[in-house]
Image: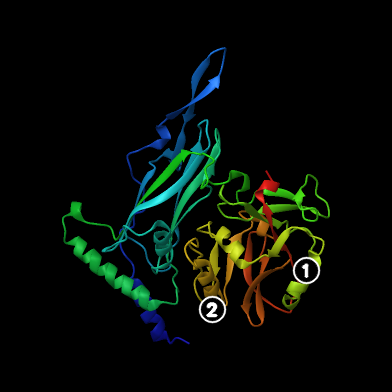
Amino acid sequence: MDTEKDVKVKRRHKAYAKLNIMTLFFVGVSFISITLAWFAYSGLITARTEVNVKAWHIEFNKNGAPVSNELTIRLNDISPGMETMEEVIDIKNQGDTAASVTYEITSARILETTLDGVEQEELKDKLSHDYPFHIDMSLSDNFIRAHDGTGNFKIAVSWPFESDNDEEDSKWGMDAYDFQLAESQKEEAERRYAIKLEISLKAVQYIDEVDAIDHDFRTGNIVLYDVKNNEKCNAISTTCLKTYVIDRDSRMSDTSVHLLPELQSTYVTGTANQYETKLQELTTNWTVKKEGLKAEDILPIISNDITSSILMRPKLSNEAIGYLNYGTRTTSQINKAISYDGSFRFINEEYPYFSSTKCYWLNTNYKDNKQFALKKIDETYSKVYGEDKTTECSIVPVIEVAKDKLR
């Protein structure tokens, strides 16, 4: 138990970590929102062959105003316990062809450390996890349909007040203070911000290439599938199940897809120790390939909500789940939750296919007496948490289906 003196010292350390003059904004010169490109294509219009064109018109907007696809983020005022700062760039496709959207961090500097040259996935992971603060980015969708398709790019900056690492918070604070002091002695035009990132949003014509996003199987898409006859079906029945795609960023090169049966249906129940037996009992007549739903299946998907999907830790501040697409980061975040007796929370409306009033066992161990489970907290939130192994929860498999069976 911290003494009153210890608490005062902690708060003093955190106060040192605060910088001044906050700015988070986007600048640039290439306004895609008012730029049209034209793609030629051939079509037989009359008795002769003519060349027609498709309009290419992608808009990037912030609060309804056009912005550039080249974004610069400058930060000088972040501190422990700060309210999460979020910026959203809305993307709208008014052209005649679908678009593939990606983003790239083209430059990154934290104080005096330049992170240029670091591979993209590693760089996103570093910004999300390697500092006492978290810088997270996400795209709502990599595929934007033609004519009226929409999406968004988000960036969020957060810093938990109680992070369980006062030493790191204090070190950052002192380093930031030294940096700002040195910058204050320069001419105003030469002064640098403590954190500077440059990001490029890229929208290109969607083409069904090997590495392209498979828009038929985007996360959350509904598929009706007969688990007994191992084939696509058209009407829900005891074997024709309503399922949802739970692959994140399925590619054209992927030959199969993972489907989660709707959680609102009735499945077998049992304790965690009965999991394998009950799963086998449920799927005895199923001819499709199946396995248990795991926490590792859910976290990479819900983590794309960079502001509302969080790790909750008793006696410590909540923090963003963060970027999970690099290396073994998903496993390390699961282990982090276990070490704090924590859980992961997400918004029901964003991920309705993971939302259920009944608890569902996940095929991921939590502790000797607990196993991960999935359940609604209330009408707004659901959680992935550690449930006592003696509790009766429902059990549902994930099925894997060849895409050729679904085309």
Closest to the observer, 5 or 261: 261
288 to 363, vertically: above or below:
above
Query: Does residue 392 appear in the picture of this structure?
Result: no
Q: Earlier in the sequence, mark 2 or mark 1?
A: 1
Across and down, in percent, residue 372 comes to 64, 72
**On the picture, is 186 further left or further right than 394?**
left
Residue bearing mark 1: 280
**On the picture, is 347 further left or further right than 194?**
right
Residue at the image point whose x is 62% and y is 48% from the top: 217
**Residue 339's mark?**
2
Q: Are marks 2 and 1 in contact (CB under 8 Å)?
A: no
Residue at the image point whose x is 36% and y is 81% from the top: 9
Closest to the observer, 343 or 76: 343
Closest to the observer, 168 or 37: 37
User: Quadrant where the C terminus lies?
Assistant: top right
Across and down, in percent, residue 371 comes to 66, 75
Across and down, in percent, residue 197 comes to 34, 54
Closest to the observer, 51 or 387: 51
Give SS at disc 2. Answer: helix
Query: What whole-number distance in Å separates the C-alpha atoms at marks 2 and 1?
Result: 31 Å
**On the picture, is 188 further left or further right than 156?**
left
Across and down, in percent, residue 333 comes to 52, 70
- The residue under label 1 is which amino acid type? Gln
Few, some or many residues within 10 Å of mark 2 (<14, 14–19, 20+): few
- The residue under label 2 is which amino acid type? Ser
**On the picture, is 18 further left or further right than 186?**
right
240 to 362, vertically: above or below:
above
Residue at the image point whose x is 40% and y is 56% from the top: 120
